[in-house]
Amino acid sequence: METAGKDYTIAAVKRALDILLLFDRKHPKLTLTEISQLSGIGKSSVLRILYTLCSQDFLYYSEDTKQYRIGAAVYRLGNGANAQIDLRHIARKHLGRLAEETGMVCYIGTRQGDKMLYIEKVMPLTMPVWAQLTTKNEGTQELYSTGIGRLLLSKLSDEEVGQYLDRVQLVKHTDKTIVDRDRLMQIIREARETGISGNWGENEAFTYSICAPIYDVNHEMVAAMSLCGLKEMLYNDHYDRFVKMVRDTAMKISKEIGYLP
């Protein structure tokens, strides 16, 4: 928006928006007095703003509790914004930077039933020879044998993870694939605690990964991302730096789709 250096702010509109922004996870409901105190606006002015916001369904007032809360119009706007968010489009630029900086391949995956669905793959501009041998694309793989999948499973309770493990057949894709139920449960619990997981040559013997979760505006883990490379590329003296890079990239994507830490 071009303003040629001028301030076109409308004070009354700004005050109304400031009041709306008071309603968050910590303050889902507020009284007139609380709104006045938090906003620093006098009660008489606040009351007029609240009346206008309520008349347009941006706020709802309860006669019983004498409290205000977010109204239907805000949810309609939020749903419209969410519908315009394209996770793949947003993620691609961040994954591209990470792929170029590391010379490795980045993926984003989400859960589709009892499978992990790859929804994006980003290669460095100069494709390494080893990456040309990978078979992963926009297909599905098992949740239990992928770092992304284990992160997605980690948001479930132990009981729900157990039910998943009961449903699926644990198959060894390589000699490194972990199919021991107790070991898998331990790995998933560790992912739940640390927010990091990985794959250790379990689907393709030469491909390893470091993975981190992606959260949405509702603090839900909606996907996870991975940085993939040969074992010697990832698991070396730079491992901690790679973990930080993956965490930071996942957080940038999360924030851009609405996540507030």
Image: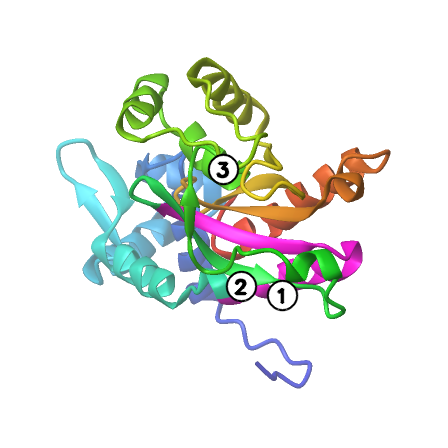
The structure residue drawn at horizontal position 43% and vertical position 46%, both measured from the top left corner, is 141
Q: Which amino acid, by three-letter code, is at mark 3?
A: His
Mark 1 or mark 3: whose residue is earlier in sequence: 1
Spatial CA span between label 2 and label 3: 32 Å
Whether the residues at callouts 1 and 2 have beta carbons within 8 Å, the answer is: yes
Where does label 3 land, which residue? 173
Magenta residues (range): 89-111
In this picture the colour scheme is rainbow
Snapshot quadrant of residue 124: bottom right
The image position of residue 111, as x and y in percent, is: 37, 45
Where does label 1 land, which residue? 93
Of 259 and 89, the residue lying toward us: 89
| Above or below: residue 246 compared with residue 49 | above
- Secondary structure of residue under mark 1: helix
- Secondary structure of residue under mark 2: helix
The image position of residue 59, as x and y in percent, is: 26, 51
Which residue ends up furthest to the top in the rendered image? 182
Q: Of the numbered discs in the image, which one, if any, rests on residue 197?
A: none
Q: Of the numbered discs in the image, which one, if any, rests on residue 90?
A: 2
The mark closer to the camera, 2 or 3, is 3
The structure residue drawn at horizontal position 53% and vertical position 63%, both measured from the top left corner, is 90
Snapshot quadrant of residue 7: bottom right
Spatial CA span between label 1 and label 3: 32 Å
Q: Which amino acid, by three-letter code, is at mark 1?
A: Lys
Count of marks overlaid on the render: 3
Of 128 and 116, the residue lying toward us: 128
Residue 53 magenta-highlighted:
no
Snapshot quadrant of residue 12: bottom left
